[in-house]
Amino acid sequence: MAEEIRDLTLKELEARFAKLGIERYRAAQVFRWLYVKGVDDLSQMTNLPAPLRARLAASFVIGGMDAEKVQKAADGVCKFLFRLKDGARIEGVAIPHEGRWTACLSTQVGCRFGCAFCASGASGFKRNLSAAEIVGQLLAVRRHLPEDPVSHVVFMGVGEPLDNYDNLLRSVRILNEEKGLHLGIRRMTVSTCGLAGAITRLAGEGLELELSVSLHAATDEKRSEILPVNRLDPLKRLLPAVKTYIEETGRKVTFEYVLLGSYNTSVEDARGLVKLVRGMNVKINLIPYNEAQTRGAFQAPTKLEALFFKSYLSRHGIDVTLRRPRGGDIRAACGQLRAQAIK
């Protein structure tokens, strides 16, 4: 059976070519066609001899991907609904910023972790995405937004990236490859709900990826109510894993904290958060809750709640930002467009 060529890193493709008796340097040529020029047809690789293209066609396929639906918000945020070969649907988001784009990519069809306020896992977990399907989202986004470059990638769409560890890492290496897109490692962010073991494993990969960890509460009791993963990896396991990542990579880690109105926005919540992270090389990213149709148990914080929480953390020496909501008119939170499509 022919192999999906976009599932392979450059080193893996070189090894496949060697087994087929094809010169190794040809792999770099193919990589450039796939990722710089963005072709999805081997016949378009015109600097390869026709007999070689025929040989490659017998061994490899190029799975194309395009958006089934595209929505654009008033603030420029674009949301993409992708239909995969098996009929499953995933999402991607592109966020504009001063002449460039950040692409938010999915790593799974659905999610098994069931965070209480997240639309991504509302319909449960279906399967992992292949590396080709993860990278294919970025290539499709580029085709729709040709005027400005995609300079940053966040693995923060549908699914838990570290639950699809091997394909995530393969995707990172494909995107980082100098002969291809050559996207900088520090321009890629992995977002996790808090899988402590996978965070520790990632710390040993020798990659200086940005890491974003969902925190959302400063106590195990409250965090377990909204993040079931906390029952498996409570704070006493999660925080040491994050500290290991900081020590091994030298990177500042971001703790994501979704502000849920009247739930985790009190003085006690702020005080507990300061105590929890003080002394760690971290940043707190406060995110006002986006009220997804599929999860109605929570409400957005008031402006006063959000500003108070940020001010309290800042006054106590914590590096903190308050995210400005974007894409609200197209319900750009991860999972919302997919949820509408599969009803």
Image: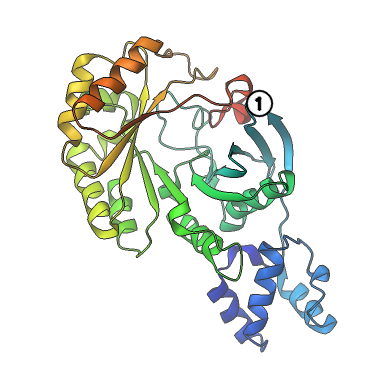
Residue 78 pos. (x, y %): 65, 34
- The structure's colour scheme is rainbow
* Residue lying furthest front: 98
How busy is the neighbourhood of tag 1: few (under 14 within 10 Å), some, or many (20 plus)?
A: some
Quarter of the image where one finds residue 93? top right
Q: Amino acid at mark 1?
A: Ala
**Residue plotted at (17% across, 40% down):** 236
Q: Can residue 152 be seen in the rendering of this structure?
A: yes
In x, y percent, where is residue 185? 45, 58
Question: Is 55 drawn above or below residue 127 in the view shown?
Answer: below
Residue 122 location (% of width, % of height):
51, 27
Secondary structure category for the residue under label 1: loop
Looking at the image, which residue is at 39% across and 50% down? 210
Can I make out residue 219 in this image?
no
Left or right of 229, for residue 107: right
Based on the displayed image, in which of its 4 quarters is residue 4 positioned? bottom right
- Image-based side of 37 in relation to 94, left or right: right
In this picture, residue 283 sits left or right of residue 117: left
Q: Could you tell me which residue is drawn at 27 percent across and 53 percent down?
A: 245
Label 1 sits on residue: 73
Q: Residue 317's quadrant in the figure?
A: top left
Q: Is residue 190 above or below residue 17?
A: above
Establish if 180 lies above or below 76: below
The front one of 250 and 124 is 250
Work out whether residue 259 or residue 121 is closer to the camera in this orientation and state it: 259
Which quadrant: the N terminus?
bottom right
Quadrant showing the C terminus: top right
Viewer-nearest residue: 51 or 35: 35
Q: Is residue 39 above or below residue 339?
A: below
Expressed as whole percent of the image width and height from the top left, the position of residue 323 reads 43, 28
Q: Foreground residue, 60 or 23?
A: 23
